[in-house]
Structure formats: C-alpha cells, structure tokens
Image: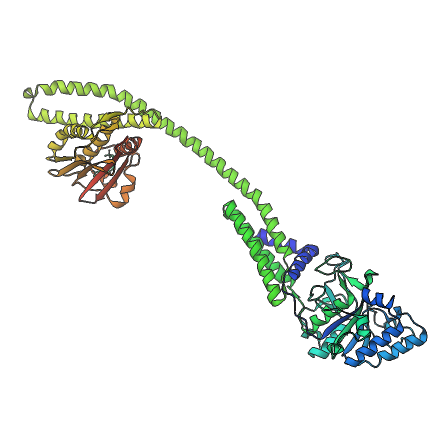
Amino acid sequence: MAFAMAVAFVICQVRLDYIEALTYDFRLAYKPISPTSGHVETIFIDKSSMNELQGEPDANDHARFLEQLAKAQPRAVVYAFNPEEIDGTAEELKNFAMTSEILPAFYYAANLLPKPGHENMLKLSPPLENIPVYPAPKTADLNIFAKDGVTRRFIFSFDGQPVLHPLLARSYNGLQFEEDYRGVFDFYDTKQAYIDFRPTGTYKPTSFYDVMNEKVDLSQYSDKVIFVGKDSLETSKHYIKTPFSRALAAMTNAEMHANILDTLILNRSPKLSSAVQNYVLTALISILTVFVVLTLRPTHGLLILGATVFGFALICHLLFITLGVWIEMAHPLLAIFICYYFFIPYRLIIENRRSWEYYQRNKLLTQVEELKSNFLRMMSHDLKTPLARIQGMLEIILRKKENLSNEQRRALRTIEDSTFELSEFIGSILNLGRIESKEIKLNLKSKDINSLMNQVVKKCDYLAERKGIKIITELEPMFAVRADEDLIKQVFTNLVENAIKYSPNNTKILVSTEEQNGKIVVQVADQGRGIAQQDLPNVFTKFYRTKDVVASDVGGSGLGLYLAKYFVELHEGKIDVDSDLGKGSTFTVRLPLDH
Ligand code: ADP
C-alpha cells in the first residue's frame, strides 16, 4: 500500500498534459453536441462573398453591411478581424466608422492582451479611432499544457479586468462575478476557463454578401450578438485548431468567439478535478493494481485490471457528458501500468521460489515414499518364509489333536489365528508394493461370479462359524464375466472377512449377486458396528482405519479396502459403501458385464 501511494505521489508530480489533452479531446468529440444559447450568430466574409465582390469588401461594402444589420437591431456586432484591414479612402473609412455608430453596439475583438498602462495599444488609428476595441485574445496550447497548438481555453479576465466575452455574456445571464462562473481557474495574471466546444459548423454561417444585399431574413439577428469573421482560407491567423481537428483552419476565429460566448452565457465550462482529487484517485487505483497483481491469478488479474481501465474511462466519460466534470485520466492510467509492470516480475520471483520449494519437498517425499515401500516389500518378503514354516509345523501338530490337552489346543488356535492375520497382512503389503511399482497385470478369463462367491463364502465359513455368524447367499443366475480370478477373489474375501471381523457374535451376513442395467452387482451386507458418516469417504484410503476400530483389539492393516478399490477399478468397476453406525454396513461392487 505504501509503495502504491508513493508511486501515485511520484506520478502525480509528472506533467502528462499531452496524454491528458488527448483523453479530454476524446471526451469532447464523443459526447452529444452542447446546446447553443440561441443568442449568438456568425457572418463570414467567405469565398462566395469575395467572388461576388471581386475581392475583399471595401469600406463602402462594410458600411452597407452595417446599415442592413442595423435594421435588425442586434444587441452587438463584433468584428473578429482588425477593421484597419479594410480598404478605402479616409472619407470612406470615416463613413464606415460613423455607420457603425448607428448600431446599438459595435466592437472589434482584438487578439491582444495589453498590460495595465498600455491600453492605448487597443486604440485604432484615425479615422477608425472611435471604434471600441476590447481584448479577446486567442489562446493555444503552444508552449504550455499539451503543446499541440490546439485552442482549448479562453481568457476570462486579465489583471482583474474582464475581456470582451464576460462583458457580453453578462447582458444575457446577469452573472457579474467570476465566482459565479464554473470552471474558472488562475493562470499567472489571468483567470481562464475551458471552452465548451461545439464542432465546426454548429453555428450556421451566413455570407457577408448575402447580408449586405438583404438576401437573408435580417430579423434573425434581432437582439443577437453577431460575430463577423473571415473565412477565405488566405491566412491561418483567422483560424484556430480545435480539440475536434488539428487542421490549420479547423475553425474560424468568429466561430471560436461564438463558442466562448455561449460557454459563458450557458455557464457550461468544463470543470477540471483538483490536484488532491487526482492524487487520491491515482493512489486508490495504484493500491487496487498492486493488490490484484499480488493476490489474484494472472488471467483473473488481467481481466480485472482491463475491466478497471474500461470502467474508469467509462465513468470519466459519463461524468464529463452529464456534469461537465473533467476527471484527469492520464495519471491513474499510468499508475496502473507502472504498478503492473513493477509487480509482475516481483510476483514471478516469489512464485518461482515457491515452486522451487515445492519441487524440493516433492523430491524428498518421493524418495521417502520409495524407501518406505522398498523397506516394506523387503521385510514382508523375508517374513513370508518363516511364517510358512510356522504354519506347516502347526498343521502337523494339529493333525494329532487327540494327544493335546484343551489348554494346549486353545494356545495352538491362537497361534493359528495370529499367523493367519500375519500372513494376510504380509499379503496386503506385498500387493501394495506391486501396485505402487505398477507390477500388477490383469489375467482376464471368463469367470462365473456366483461360483467365485461360493468359494469365497466357503473359505470364510470357518471364521464365521467361530463367531456364530451365519452367511446367507442370494445368488441370481447370470452370465460369466471376464475377470482376474485371484484379484476378484481377494476383493470379495476382504469384504466378507471385514463383515465377520466387524460384526458381533451371532449375527447374519448377506452375500448377494444380481444383474442390473448391464452390470453385475455384488453386495456384502452385515449387522455389525457400522461406519460413521464422516469416515465413509476415507475407508478406501491407504492405511485408514476408523478410530473406534483402532481403539478396539480387532487387528488389521487398513489396506484391505484400498486394495479392493484398486482391483475393482482395474476391472473398470466401482465399489461403494453405505452404512448406519451401530446397525451395519453394506459394501456394493459393480462390475461391467461385457468386460
Ligand atoms: P482393516 O485391515 O482395518 O480391516 P480395511 O481397509 O479392510 O482395513 O478397512 C478399513 C477400515 O474400514 C477398517 O479399519 C474399519 O474401520 C472399516 N471397515 C471396513 N469394513 C467394515 C465393516 N464391514 N464394518 C465396519 N467397519 C468396517
């Protein structure tokens, strides 16, 4: 967070006027055209006027033009070019100057901003000296701000003295003070504001010649401010570049004045967000970026950042359109890029280190696992031979039972049980070893499951009888399946032995087979201790034994069901368990028939 805030702080110190101006121009270009006040008109000395008059209009033409306009009683007529450019004899010019006095107001909007004490710069030379001249300078971002020569701002007042536009606007909206206008900001000795631009041509231009010859309805100029300008494409000084177009003659000075005046009459100057607001926004966006880069998955992060950039741009655009608020976009956007590109390598380093650690740990675990299974296999192998010898000896002794006392017989039975348990355990461990080294190969043969089940039950009967448990079989006649006899027998022997092991004396076990939807379903159901719900998902895991079983003295390795599941799945079958604690368990094996 501290880093993000520091980045935001540093970025906000950098001037990004050019980028910011581009985003501003984009917002201006893609917004509904601002309304006009209806109080402003433009008239141009255009190519057609010059063709008709065979050159620039002279002083007599101008006098005639003003006479026509005077009939409409406009509120003010403003020349956007220097009347001194008008051709004519001193007499004719004097006549023109006098004609201008019949208008309610006639001004020359000079592209000048004289320092206090130098107001005489605004005086025209005789015989035009009585024409009022007001400062109405053009501004362009030439050496400041975006430095692209585009006009975006206008001067509201200089050294406390208002320029022409606020004076004209005041007569319509009555707003006296600069505080009444939105978006006015200080710039050196001036107060300035941004122009609420409309695209070129929004003010329907009329040709000078048409007005002069009353070819247009003059009543449209009644009580209006009329900017008269030149549009003959002869010199770029009569034009400006606008946010809509960087062409040299993108808009005439007269239309620019019309835009400025309407911005003021309607009080719609775009309002730039403050430096503090800009910093807060940049900091928030930087924090979000750092958070996203460090915590989210790269694709998610990229999506969220993309959405943030898009959402931010959209909000800025909507605020500009609806409220005329200009939120700076350049700094927050740059902050996103810098934070993103700074933190991505950082995150890569962290992740690399983490995956190296995982790799090392994994390597160690694999080695340990390998050592463990090697050890188990070696040990069980070496145990098998002495165990077989014990079992052989036991058989010989038990053949002559009648020579033994009851106590000796009981002792020998215990030895028999224990060796049986031990050989089962060794068998399981050896199988586990075979599974883990992927040694197991299926030896598939066509087998009748029912006869296999009968063999399993027969083998387990002896164990069941000793606990007074009755094994009931319900075997439905069915087709043979292709199975590995040894493995499938091991699966069902384990299920039946478990049912006996985990059931109290004198209960029943039901072993059933049936065919269901092209599958053979074998179930082993007991009335034993059952398995708690939370243990059910684990009983097929390697070495897993339920807590109550571990606490009791029932022996086992926790491998039987793991092996059973593995063997059943080798046959493309499935094994499930359903159990009620204290009431019993049912293990179900499904094997495909066509296997
Ligand atoms: P074990 O050698 O412990 O019997 P198994 O893998 O065969 O290992 O069984 C895993 C565990 O599942 C057993 O320890 C026992 O807790 C539980 N379990 C298996 N079969 C039954 C059953 N029929 N009734 C109750 N619990 C059983």
Residue 93 in the figure: left or right of residue 516: right
Residue 39: tell me if it is visible: yes
Q: Which residue corresponds to the image point at 51% horizontal and 40% vertical from the top-left?
A: 351
Q: Which residue corresponds to the image point at 41% horizontal and 28% vertical from the top-left?
A: 367
Q: Position of residue 115 (x, y in %)?
A: 83, 69
Residue 82: name its quadrant: bottom right
Q: Which residue corresponds to the image point at 66% horizontal and 62% vertical from the top-left?
A: 28
Residue 414: name its quadrant: top left
Q: Nearer the viewer, residue 149 or 423?
A: 149
Residue 589: name its quadrant: top left
- Farthest residue toward the left? 402
Q: Nearer the viewer, residue 254 or 171?
A: 254
Residue 127: tell me if it is visible: no
Q: Position of residue 188 (x, y in %)?
A: 76, 65
Q: Nearer the viewer, residue 421 or 23?
A: 23
Residue 447 in the figure: left or right of residue 148: left
Ligand 1 lies in which image quarter? Answer: top left
Give the quarter of the figure containing the C terminus: top left
